[in-house]
């Protein structure tokens, strides 16, 4: 297990010699201790990345750079079981999900390896004769700050396009979940990515993350996490005019019209809110359901929710593991209490399983009916397995309810009426919408939020714009 900082192609202790425990949320046991980086370690990592930015990586023949990224993908696939097990032990997500996510890490490196040679400038017909063209160049050192809910996947979403564009990176994983990030750093080295191009610094966000955001050697910050942290990072980064892209929180709507295929809708929708134990920025945590099918939807949804298999994430057949921490579970339980106090009707869930699961941070998935927009459980991101269901009568009302949120990340829509699909998707203020399904993220397509859900679009070819400068050149014909 990699437990030290990964700087300049080497595994090193924190300069302070300090470390912190990393816990398995399935039973509260300590998995290992990981080096606790500080400001001086950030300086070391950025220094290595700055040096590597002027080295061979950025100037490398694109085909060769692509080859090394393909090699990262190959090595991740070769070690897929190791990545998956490490991720499951560190996050509590079911092993099958971790295997899928490790596969996505490999897919992501392959996608951007393929993109290296397809991302180029253009010629522009300007006035005045001559030739005007653009060049795509690396930004420089990119600090990539990621959360604990999809640690290796989100790291790959940022690393792969940043590296494809010829940048060097300093990756800062969340303190709950540093293990797969450290392994990924080492795998990049094994794939032939030069020393200093990929660095991984573990340690507290308020120290390491803040230092990266303010560091003059860093030219770009890519952050995924809470909206308040994103705002803080943007302020700190402003002093040195860094480029900033943000993927933040969400409170996504799931609109169900009366002509929807209710069975399919329920089958998919339970996972659109409860997968990853609800710790998903895209979680459709507000179901907005037409009055005509409201009772039927609730009956079917609650029945399906009660069938979800909760248990130890390494056990075959388990569909829902624990939450990341006792603190996160306590926070979710407070929301459940608030929902009850504000008059919403708890139809199921919200309990801590006992017996063999008592030591882990488990919570049964909760469904609230008869909720109203003023309620905390409808307005705030809970980041846990809690669904609030609201009824509506007209299409206009459904749109108003869907948009009545400070967030705008994802949303789903269930109807067979194509005209309505066009009207409602245009009216929804969210960055990602899925129609008659719950899938919202594709490696090949842009992903990101409106309003306080973020800034910029990750994934797809659009992400390459986040990690490259455009240089315009004009050559006179005289
Ligand atoms: P946080 O914002 O607390 O942490 C995210 C990362 O930022 C962690 O690495 C953390 O380090 C670091 N960090 C914390 N404080 C600072 C700081 N002052 N300066 C710089 N970095 C800091 O979010 P969570 O980890 O709690 O993740 C959950 C949140 O992420 C949810 O709100 C969720 O919606 C959002 N999210 C958004 C996604 C999207 O794509 N829109 C995807 C996934 C999650 P440390 O762990 O050491 O505190």
Image (cartoon, rainbow, N blue to C red):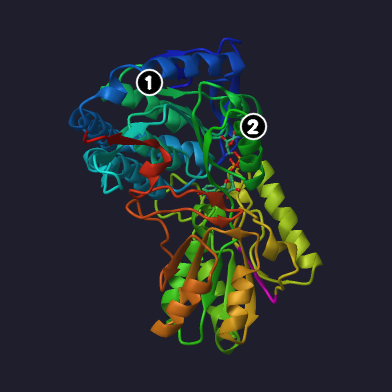
Quadrant location, the N terminus:
top left
The percent coordinates of residue 332 (x first, y second) are 68, 53
- Residue 193 in view in this figure: no
Lateral position of residue 377 relative to residue 82, left or right = right
Q: Nearer the viewer, residue 341 or 247?
A: 247
Res 236 label? 2
Q: What is the secondary structure assignment of the residue under circle 2?
A: helix
Range covered by the magenta-colored residues: 366-370
Q: Please tell me which residue is depicted at 41% across the width and 62% down the height of the picture.
A: 439
Magenta stretch secondary structure, dominant = strand
In this view, the residue farthest toward the left is: 63
- Check if residue 262 falls in the magenta segment: no
Q: Please tell me which residue is depicted at 61% across the width and 34% down the height of the picture.
A: 238
The answer to which image quadrant residue 33 occupies is top right
The percent coordinates of residue 358 (x first, y second) are 63, 46
Lateral position of residue 10 relative to residue 306, left or right = left
The answer to which image quadrant residue 225 occupies is top right
- Measure the C-alpha gap from mark 2 to mark 1: 23 Å
In this view, the residue farthest toward the front is: 478
- Residue 151 in view in this figure: yes
Q: Is mark 2 within 8 Å of ligand 1?
A: yes
Tag 1 residue = 53
Quadrant location, the C terminus:
top left
The percent coordinates of residue 166 (x first, y second) are 33, 29
Q: Please tell me which residue is depicted at 61% across the width and 42% down the height of the picture.
A: 230
Q: Please tell me which residue is depicted at 40% across the width and 54% down the height of the picture.
A: 446
In the image, residue 294 above or below residue 476:
below
Lateral position of residue 111 relative to residue 253, left or right = left
């Amino acid at each position: 297990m990699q437990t030290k900082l990964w700087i300049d192609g080497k595994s090193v202790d924190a300069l302070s010699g300090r470390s912190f425990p990393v816990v398995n949320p399935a039973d509260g046991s300590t998995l290992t201790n990981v080096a606790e980086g500080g400001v001086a370690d950030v300086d070391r990592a950025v220094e290595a990345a700055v040096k590597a930015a002027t080295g061979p990586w950025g100037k490398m023949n694109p085909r060769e750079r692509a080859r090394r990224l393909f090699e990262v993908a190959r090595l991740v696939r070769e070690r897929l079981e190791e990545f998956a097990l490490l991720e499951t032990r560190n996050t509590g997500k079911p092993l099958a999900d971790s295997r899928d996510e490790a596969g996505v890490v490999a897919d992501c490196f392959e996608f951007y390896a393929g993109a290296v040679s397809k991302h180029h400038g253009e010629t522009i017909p300007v006035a005045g004769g001559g030739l005007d063209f653009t060049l795509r160049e690396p930004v420089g050192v990119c600090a990539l700050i990621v959360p604990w809910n999809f640690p290796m996947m989100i790291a790959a979403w940022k690393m792969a396009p940043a590296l494809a564009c010829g940048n060097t990176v300093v990756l800062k994983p969340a303190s709950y979940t540093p293990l797969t990030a450290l392994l990924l750093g080492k795998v990049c080295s094994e794939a032939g990515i030069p020393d200093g191009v990929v660095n991984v610094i573990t340690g507290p966000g308020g120290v390491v993350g803040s230092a990266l955001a303010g560091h003059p050697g860093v030219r770009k910050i890519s952050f995924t996490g809470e909206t308040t942290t994103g705002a803080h990072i943007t302020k700190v980064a402003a002093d040195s005019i860094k480029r900033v892209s943000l993927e933040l929180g969400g409170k996504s709507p799931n609109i169900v019209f009366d002509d929807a295929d209710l069975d399919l809708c329920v089958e998919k929708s339970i996972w659109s809110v409860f997968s990853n134990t609800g710790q998903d920025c895209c979680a459709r945590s507000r179901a907005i359901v037409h009055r005509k099918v409201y009772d039927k939807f609730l009956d079917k949804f609650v029945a399906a929710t009660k069938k979800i298999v909760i248990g130890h994430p390494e056990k075959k057949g388990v569909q829902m593991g624990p939450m990341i921490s006792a603190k996160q579970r306590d926070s979710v339980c407070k929301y459940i209490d608030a929902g009850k106090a504000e008059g919403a009707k708890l139809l199921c869930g919200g309990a801590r399983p006992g017996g063999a699961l008592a030591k882990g941070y488990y919570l049964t998935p909760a469904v609230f009916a008869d909720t109203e927009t003023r309620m905390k459980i409808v307005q705030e991101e809970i980041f846990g397995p809690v669904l609030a269901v609201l009824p509506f009568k007209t299409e206009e009302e459904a749109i108003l309810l869907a948009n009545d949120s400070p967030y705008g990340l994802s949303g789903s829509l269930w109807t067979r009426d194509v005209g309505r699909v066009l009207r409602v998707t245009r009216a929804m203020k969210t960055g990602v919408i899925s129609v008659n399904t719950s899938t919202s993220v594709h490696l090949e397509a842009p992903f990101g939020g409106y309003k306080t859900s973020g800034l910029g679009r990750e994934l797809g070819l659009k992400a390459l714009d986040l990690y490259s400068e455009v240089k315009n050149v004009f050559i006179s014909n005289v």
